[in-house]
Amino acid sequence: MKTKEPFVFVVVATLCVATVSAYAQVPNAMLQERIAVTARPSLDSVVLRWAPLTYRVWRAGNENGYRIERFVLARNGHLLGQPEKVILHPSLKPLPEERWRRLVENDRYAPVAAQALYGDRFEANLKEGDIFTIVNKARENDQRFAFALFCADMSPATARASGLWFTDKQVSRGEKYLYRVVINSMDSLRGNVFLSADDPYLLPKPQNLKADFEDQLVSLRWDRNESINYSAYVLERSEDGRHFSLVSDAVMLTVSPGENNDTRYEYAVDSLNERSGIYYYRIKGITPFGEQSPPSDIVSGKSITAVSQPPYIASVENRDNTSLDIAWTFSKENESAIKGFEVERASKPGERPSQLTPDLLPPHARRFTDTRPNTVNYYRVVAIGHDDEAYQSQVYFAETIDSIAPMRPAGLHASVDDHGDVTLTWQRNKEEDIYGYRVYKAFHESEELAQVTSEPLKESYYHDHLDLNTLNRKVFYSVMAVDRSQNHSGLSPLLEVALPDKVRPQAPVLLPVESSGSGVILRWVPGGSEDIAQYAVYRKSGSGPDWQRIAILPAANDTLFAFTDTATGEGETNVYTILSIDEAGLESEPSATAAGSKLKSTLAEAVTWRKPIVNREENKITVRWRYDGQRPSKFRIFRAVDHQPPVQLTTVDAGESELTDTLVPGRHYVYRIMAVFENGSQSSLSKEMVFQY
């Protein structure tokens, strides 16, 4: 309406469970049409209701009008050769603006529809959280369209005034009709419905109404009807099961499922003012024609009062050390919310408690006597609600007096295997209140014992594991008994356990080798282990992967040992290492390696070094050489780092004349090279190329 004061409206729907769709009652199968049409048959008339499915179609229908056509397709069970067409209305439009005023005064939905049709602007002033919050955020045109169709769904009078309702009173029994609603000048925008005035029209009642009652709240659920799509529902409540009244004057909207939505339920909630008494509920569906369905079956229930605070154990009194009297507090107001109390007891924290009360104590109970307490007791009082929910008190510790310590354990014995697994056993104490045993360990007889069990052991044995790769040759154990009153016995006599020797001896230190005409002379300093019995000498060829033991020498108190390898061939370079062997037959890690060869009586002339190339950016050096003598088969390059004995770095073919090596800053390098010939002879070692990087 083009007035100075546009309509401002507030829609309240306190029990609505979802937002409104464009046309709630339209079945999914009809959503492909541009105008959705539904009909209600009766013996003397057929009522049509339709809805454009988009804002553009709705606006076109309002401006051009809807043409209502009827086709008679069959009569008395026989198809007609040519359908009989009748135009029931040439151009049905919304009422003019001035004719809405009386309707606005008497129909709560008419102002909204009129504002959507004729208002200069359209605003939905809704409270935060109301059902139309989503619609309020849409564009204005979408708001106009959605609210106009919603109001037509809710009010037959508004539907007629909006040009979305038509009643055909010229119907006859036995005839089958096809109704068509067409927008004038836009024949492609239309919708159809097929029916007969004889068709039965019965509104089913909502099915399978269920209710879940909680503290001052009830949640309701019922099946979505498959045969008819109700636009909305009304919820009715009764306190006697006979006289029902509306929970709210606002309807509950139904949400049409989308193509991929298989939701089969409708929902509602209601708040309960009283926590006592039985409440009865039923649901009625509302059609797009403003009709109410028969009520659903009645469901009933009672609000379940929640417990606001669990019981609290105030004290546990010891009566002559033979019984314990437990007292607790609990709100008087919460007694009606529970069935009664249970009292539970455990012997230690975290243990599953046992129930001391075979039957529930009454809700007014505040005291219970445990006539057979343990020495150590952990009590808990549990209130059981009418919904079988358990409300637990805090855990309260109480004990009877026991100051007599148990006897110290006897018969401690140990066995240990070569893997370091130790099994301790001892005799069980004869006291009936033994709670467990604690195990202590030390690696020296004079050392303070350390407890190795995190909690008392229930059995009279213990498994320990020791790392045998240490210098310790013995371990010491002791055991203590603990009763339920936490009285501790004295420690058992200290048990000494000898450990298997699993510690490898230290490796010897190999000194620089000496190459001579008689062989390769090895010298080494013994390792620091006291139980070294032998030394094993190993050799491999400079290029070979396999080590060969060439000698076993007995250990002695000498500070320097020597061995000459005379079995190697002249000019053949070998690598050597030495191992220590202790009295248990354990071998040390190999010593550092050293290379040497038995010198030939005559050697070819030495290789001559050329000036090296140093790349300091990449930390690399390229050593270069030349050989003017007989052509060799290969060259052997040796390197010593930081004044260590030289070792063979690599062997290259005779055609090579340079080698690139990677350097580490701050180290001292010495390179030497030797020519090797096909017959196994070799040249003298070259002069040293010394490089400090």
Image: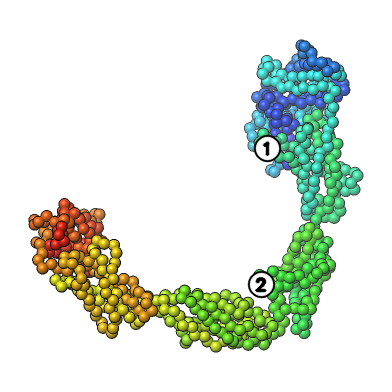
Pointer 1 with pointer 2, Cβ within 8 A: no
Q: Position of residue 151 (x, y in %)?
A: 75, 31
Helix, strand or loop at label 1? It is: loop
Q: Nearer the viewer, residue 650 or 9?
A: 650
- Please give the residue where the numbered disc 1 appears in the rendered image: 261
- Please give the residue where the numbered disc 2 appears in the rendered image: 349
State the CA–CA distance, disc 1 to disc 2: 51 Å
Colour scheme used in the picture? rainbow
Query: From where the camera sits, is residue 474 visible?
Result: yes
Q: Position of residue 542 (x, y in %)?
A: 23, 63
Q: Position of residue 101 (x, y in %)?
A: 79, 26
| Badge 1 amino acid | Asn
Whether 295 is drawn above or below 270: the answer is above
Whether 675 is drawn above or below 261: the answer is below
The residue at the point 47 percent across, 86 percent down is 445
- Whether residue 649 sits left or right of residue 357 in the image: it is left
Q: Residues within 10 Å of mark 1 (few under 14, many from 20)?
A: few
Tell me which numbered mark, 1 or 2, is placed earlier along the sequence: 1
The residue at the point 72 percent across, 26 percent down is 36
Q: Residues within 10 Å of mark 2 (few under 14, many from 20)?
A: few
Taking the view exactly as shown, the residue that stands out farthest to the top is 82
Q: Quadrant of residue 9?
A: top right
The residue at the point 73 percent across, 21 percent down is 192
Helix, strand or loop at label 2? It is: loop
Q: Nearer the viewer, residue 220 or 150?
A: 220
* Residue 376 disc label: none
Quadrant where the N terminus sits is top right
Quadrant where the C terminus sits is bottom left
Q: Nearer the viewer, residue 614 or 455?
A: 455
Query: From where the camera sits, is residue 669 visible?
Result: no
